[in-house]
Structures are given as structure tokens and as C-alpha cells.
Amino acid sequence: MEAVGGYAAGIYLRSPTTGLLLLALFTGLPLQLFRPWWRMQVNRPYPVAEAYRSGQAVLLPDAESAMSRFPQLMAGLPFTFASLYEPVTAGTERFGVLVVLREATPGIPVGTADRERLRRAAEQLAADLTALAADGGRVLWEGDPMGVPAPPPEAGAEGARRAADRLAQAVLSLDREGRIGYVNTAAEELLGVDGPHLRGRLLWEALPWLGHPAYEDHFRAGFMSGEPVHFPARRGRHPPGQWLSVDLYPAADGVTLTLGTSAKPAYAPASRTRQGPVADADAAVDGYADLDVSADEASALYRPVALAIALTEAVTARQVSAVVTEELLPAFGGRQLAIYLLDERHLYLAWETGFPQGFLNRFDGVSLDVRLPGVETLTTGRPMFFESMQHLAAAYPGIPLDADVGARAFLPLIASGRPVGSCILGFDSPRGFSPEERTVLTALAGLIAQALARARRYDSEVALARGLQSALLPHRLPVREHVDTVGRYLPGTQGMEVGGDWYDVVETGSGLLALVIGDVQGHGVAAAATMGQLRSAVRAFALSGSTPEQVVSGTNQLLIDLDPGQFASCCYMLLDPTSGSVMAARAGHPQPLLRHPDGRTEVLDLAGGVVLGIDPEASYPVTELRLTTGSILALYTDGLVEKPGLDIDVGVERLRRALEAARPSPLTETADRLISEAGNTADRPDDIALLLASRTGGDP
């Protein structure tokens, strides 16, 4: 931490729960202020999770860079700070992530020296953990994080102490973990507590009234942003109306806190790091004063924003449900979740987690006429909260229960006045639901309903688009003597998962075989529709006996006449199955590969013209070559060889080596092998088409 100029640092380690990282050690900031970030799912869009998943450092020098890449992080910590995340790995073993927080350097990236120091520290930690594991140690973390204390707070020089004691304003000094070091005489008199009873204690333990969640965001701002923060706070409820002004003056080695008497404010002014006033301070504190509000419950205050951001990234109903599981359950300490969707006046189970296997099946497809809490919460539009299973059983006699102990919340999912379904939250032990929690959960249910309604529309559109694309691609390829052909298609995983890639094999009237592959720019229904028009045009030209140059030129003119605002690449080959002679024309498409009978594989160098749909005067020269028996021709679209951040030539070379190493037969296995790596990638920005043709005989 000190080597890279940080003021706080921590280590996340794997936990016994698959996919969950836990904060193991932390120093430099009060632990209790960061309880919402003690647990981190590895698939969430946070820098800790990305560093763990990718095995690469994530370096955020300022708030702007953090906001552009990780808006959910900044939704909960909207302050000016820098953060560095270095994965702790040894070979293929991933232990966790090293985190350092420091002052922001706007516009200035993290320097090479600091990157190297961070990397060396992570490597040393990984080596130590590897040695521990080799000795039989269990390199997993369970439970809450441990605070690594800074040196004990000092009272300071005698002269400075006397000077501060002469001030009429109450002054306390805090270290970076929130422990009180110095208390002047005015503070002792204002608080009615002697300095020795305060020094060395955490601020929120010594002065519990400052520990209300209503003030936590101000303290986070002070400790993290390095800028002064000012806010009013009420010192308990008695005597009524006793408000104090709180000022925080942070520095690298600690924070100076001053207190002053103040009349009840009309509102709680925002700190300098946050814009605009917040809600009425009296109401905010009153709302907490009668409640036993834990830090876990307070963290739920951030969930509406974090969940809303996460839901904007969820596209399908399944993705929405997964986001709800990952964001909502941890916020409230829940263990069970079920989502039912409405269809034709019946509720159907769409998602469940945490319930005994098969328990919820009995409620799948229930009518809206049945008296069940999951039904009535939707028909009445009112959320229902049961603080124990006994309360639930008393309200609905005879209802099957999955547990004897616990609590349940039933939330209506209603979007813009339209019923969408219902959501069930389950808890392992009895618990109360504060008015604040009920309000937050009801608001979150509205967000979830909107996301599910949008996802269901999307699912319907995807089904339509997939049906369109399936109809446009060939259902089977012609079987010809002396030639085997195999085609493969994979949709992209972003957007609608449909696009404009296509392949085709056409038997011409002259006994020749046309091999075609193409790629329409873009994705979605428009690209698929254009693809269908181009495929039909190519087939028509091929069946009429046109030469390769005429086929490609004619298709180019057709696309320009259609004027869809799109362009396309294409490779057209006319193969004589008997002799193996090939005539090929190419329009801006990646070069095909040719695997010779001896296994040697090369990237062909076909002459070509510009992509289709750009230039009506474009010409497309023809290249002639010959396929010998046992050779394999591979035509593909750029989705198979392109990866973000890598040159396309790298992908082409990787595909060439894969084809060279593949068994020449059966051809279906070769196609599966070439496309399997891309198929196993969850994040494919582009769709993929592959067409293989193999000479099996015919030579004299």
C-alpha cells in the first residue's frame, strides 16, 4: 500500500462457495463503512471480479475512468479516488485479488513503476499461498474480514495539544481506521466524556449516534475523497432537537473531526463531493432511531441504484433473474428466491434458487383464482411480509411449507400498471421487515417487473428473428459424388443473437457446384433479411449459369439497388467435382484456407474487389485453382477469426493451425473442431459461418 502511495488496501480471497470472493484483510479505512463490498460474486461487473476473471490488472486512476468502465462501483462509492486491482495467481491457480485505494490522478494513468510494485507484491503473495497449500493449508477464506491495524494513535505534541485545548470548538483526531487519537477539552465538555474513555476507540463505538446509516455516506466521502465534508447530525433523541454540525478534514495520515452546536437544519446539506441536498435530516435520523438497523440492512440503500444499473445490462428473462439473485439476496440476507411469470391468467415458475428440489413444482401453473400469497400479492398489487413461517401458516391454513423456521416476502411484479408476475424472497430465520426495507423491496420489485417485461418482449423478438434466420439458411446441403460439404453457423451472443452471415452450396445446371459464403454488416432482423435477399440472388445467378465474376457483380448491383444502408462481403467458388478445378471471385471477404492431402495448410491468395453495396462500377477478377483428392477447402466469416484487441491475422493463423492439425475425415468432426473454440466462448460479438468442402475422388 505504502509503496504505491495508497491510503487503504485489502485482499479478496476465494471462499468455499463457488464463484464468491470474500474480503479477507483490509487496512487504512473503517471496515464497517464498507460492509456492502465484503462479498463479491466473480461474475459481477465490478473491478475486483474482472481482475479475478481475466487474470489481468485493472487500474483506475480517477473517478471518470471508473465510471466509464464500472458504473455500479461508482453508484455505491461516488467519490473522487483511484483504485488498483491486481490478481493473485500462480500458473493456473487463482487465489484472489489485491486491492489498493489511493488519491485520484485525473488524466494521468498509473505509472509503470507502481504497476510493477503491485505485480511483484501479488506474485510474492501468490508464492506464499502456494507454499501454504503445498503444506496442506486451506487457501480459502470464511467469515468476516480482518482489519490490519495501523500504528496506535498518538495524542500529538504537547504544544499542539495545548493550542487545540484553547479552542472553543470540539476537535477530535482520527486515524485511517476511524480510531480516536486526540480529544480536546471542548470536545470532552460537549460530549460529556473524558478523553481517556474516548482515545483508542473506534469513533462509532465511542459515539454510537454517529454510527447511524444516515451518516455513513458522509464518512465514506471524507475517508475516500480527501476533500472536506460537512453535515449535520443529531446526538441521539434526547434531549430533542440537539443537533451538531460535523466537519471532516481528511489527510493521508488521518482525519480531523470537529463538532459544533447547531439548530435543527431544514435539510441535511450534501458534502462537497456529492451534489444537491438529501432528504430531511430529522426524518432520516428518526427513521433509523426506532429501528435496530444493521450495516447489512443499511447497505440495501444502495441496491436500487446498483440493481437498476445491472438490470439495464440484462437482456433475457433468465439474465434478469440471475441479476436479481446476485444483487437482491445478498443485500437483505436472503437465501431463497422464486420468480413466477403471468401467462393467460396462470403463474408459471420462471426461476428458483435455494428451495428444496421439486418443492415449487406444485405451484407451477396455478390460476389467479387460487388463494396463495404469490397469487394474491399480484392480484391486489400489495406486497406481503411474513416475519415467521408460523405467521405464513396462520394466514394461509394448509399451505405447504418448505421449512419450519424462516421468513418470507411476496412482492408483486407490476410494470406500468400491467401485471407481470410475482417474486418470493425467503430467509432462513425469523426476522422483521422495517418500514424502510419494505419500501426498498417494493421499489425494487417495480424495477424487476420493468426488466422482465422488457426481457419477455426481447425473447419474443429473438424467437421471431431466429425463425427467420433458420428459414433463410440451408436446411441441408446437396450430396454429390467426389465432394463432401459441411456447413456450420453460430449466432453472436450480443444483441439478438442473429446476424447476416450465411453459407450455401448450389447445384448449377451445368453439373458444377457453387460454394458460397457471405457476411452482411450488422446484426438483428435487418441484417438477416438482407442476407436472405442476397442468398436468393446468388442462387438465382448461379442457377442461370453465370460466371463467378457475373454472380458477384450482379449481387453487388442488386444490393446497391435495394439501398438497405448495409454492405456485405462474399466469396463465391465454382467447383467441378470431377476434375477439381475451381474458379473463385472474392468481394472483401477473408481469404479461404486450403489443406493439402499431406496436411500442409495454406492461406489462399485470391484476387478480389471491394465489398458489395459500395461501388456500382466495381470489378471482381476470377482466380483459378485445383483441388486434388483428399484436400479440404475452408470458407469462413470474420467472426471465427476476429477477437477484440487482436489482429485478424493472428486469428487466421490460429485457424490455419487448427485445420492443419485436424483429422481429414470425417469432415463433420473437422468442422466441429474448428468451430468448437468459438462456440465455447460466452461473449461472441459477431456471428460465425463456416463451410468446408473436401475432394473425395474424381481424379483420372
Image: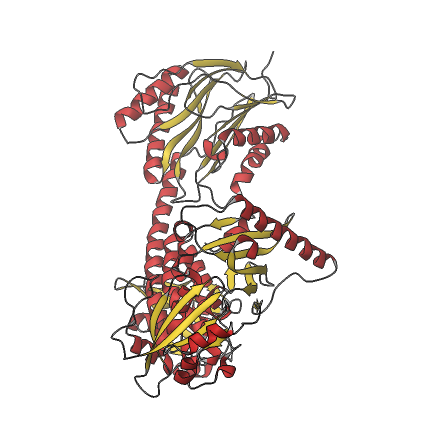
Instruction: Name the quadrant of the N terminus.
Output: bottom right
Residues 82 and 507: in front is 82
Picture coordinates of residue 485, whole percent (x, y): 52, 27
Residue that sits furthest to the right in the current view: 135
Lateral position of residue 164 relative to residue 562, left or right: right
Q: Quadrant of the C terminus?
A: top right
Horizontal and vertical percent position of residue 330:
47, 67
Q: Residue sitting at 51 percent across and 26 percent down?
A: 479
Q: Position of residue 441 (x, y in %)?
A: 37, 70
The image shows a total of numbered marks equal to 0
Is residue 655 left or right of 312 when viewed as pictured?
Answer: right
Q: Is residue 307 above or below residue 236?
A: above
Q: How is the image coloured?
A: secondary structure
Q: Is residue 342 above or below residue 385?
A: above
Residue at x 43% of width, y 56% of height: 81
Question: From the viewer's perspective, is residue 223 above or below residue 468?
Answer: below
x and y percent of residue 455 in the render? Answer: 36, 54
Res. 79 visible in picture: yes
Q: Does the rendering let one see residue 371?
A: no
